[in-house]
Amino acid sequence: MQTIEQLLAAHPFYLDMKPEYLAELAACAQLKVFKANQKLATVDQSADAFYVIRSGRVAIELETPPRGRITLQTLSTGEVIGWSWLFPPYRWEFDVRAIDTVHTVALDGKCLRGKCNQNLEMGWDLMQRFSRIMAARIKATRLQILDVYRAGA
C-alpha cells in the first residue's frame, strides 16, 4: 500500500515537486472515494478542498436557465479538480459530479493555505501549477461556449 506522499509524487500534477513540499502537502491530505453520480462539489458551497483524481471520471457542470445542466468539461485519472479553495470567499463556482466511481486524494484547503503562508516558496510552486490548470480550463470553457453559441445560431 502506497502512502499519500507516494501517491502524490506519482501524480502528473506534482511532477518534479520537491520531496519536502510533497511531505507538507501529504499532511493536509486524505484518500476519498466518490460513487457514481455523487457530488464532489456544489456551486456556491464552501470550497474547502481540491481533489487529485487517482482513477475515475468527473463532470464539471453548470446549470443554465435556458438549457438546463451542461457539462463544461470531463476530467479523469491524472487530473486535478478545484481551485476555489485558493481565493476568498472560498466557494465553488461549478458543480462537480462523479460519472463513475472516483478515487481521489483530497487536500484540505485551509491546511494548505496555512502551509503556503508559512513557506512562500512552496506556495509559489503550488500557485504556478494551479495557474497552468486554470489557463487550460478557461480555454476549454471558452471553446465549449463557442460550440454552444454555434449550435444555437
Image (cartoon, rainbow, N blue to C red):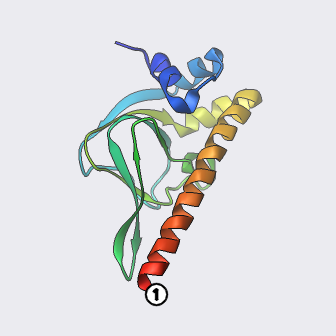
For mark 1, what is the residue? 153
Q: Is 120 located above or below residue 4 in the figure? A: below
Residue drawn at x 25%, y 52% as measured from the top left: 37
Picture mark count? 1
Residue drawn at x 50%, y 35% as measured from the top left: 108
Q: Position of residue 2 (x, y in %)?
A: 39, 14
Who is closer to the viewer here, 119 or 55? 55
Residue 27 in sight here: no
Who is closer to the viewer here, 38 or 60? 60
Residue 106 in sight here: yes
Q: Please, what is the three-letter code of the amino acid marked with disc 1?
A: Ala
Quarter placement of the N terminus: top left
Local packing at callout 1 (Cα closer than 10 Å; few below 14, some 14-19, many 20+) is: few
Residue 33 location, quadrant: top left
Q: Is 45 located above or below residue 122 in the figure? A: below
Is 70 placed left or right of 150 in the picture?
left
Q: Secondary structure at mark 1?
A: loop
Q: Is 88 located above or below residue 121 in the figure? A: below
- Residue most toward the bottom? 153
Q: Position of residue 83 (x, y in %)?
A: 56, 47
- Residue most toward the right? 120
Q: Is 22 located above or below residue 140 in the figure? A: above
Q: Position of residue 90 (x, y in %)?
A: 56, 52
- Residue most toward the top? 1
Q: Position of residue 86 (x, y in %)?
A: 61, 46
Who is closer to the viewer here, 49 or 128? 128
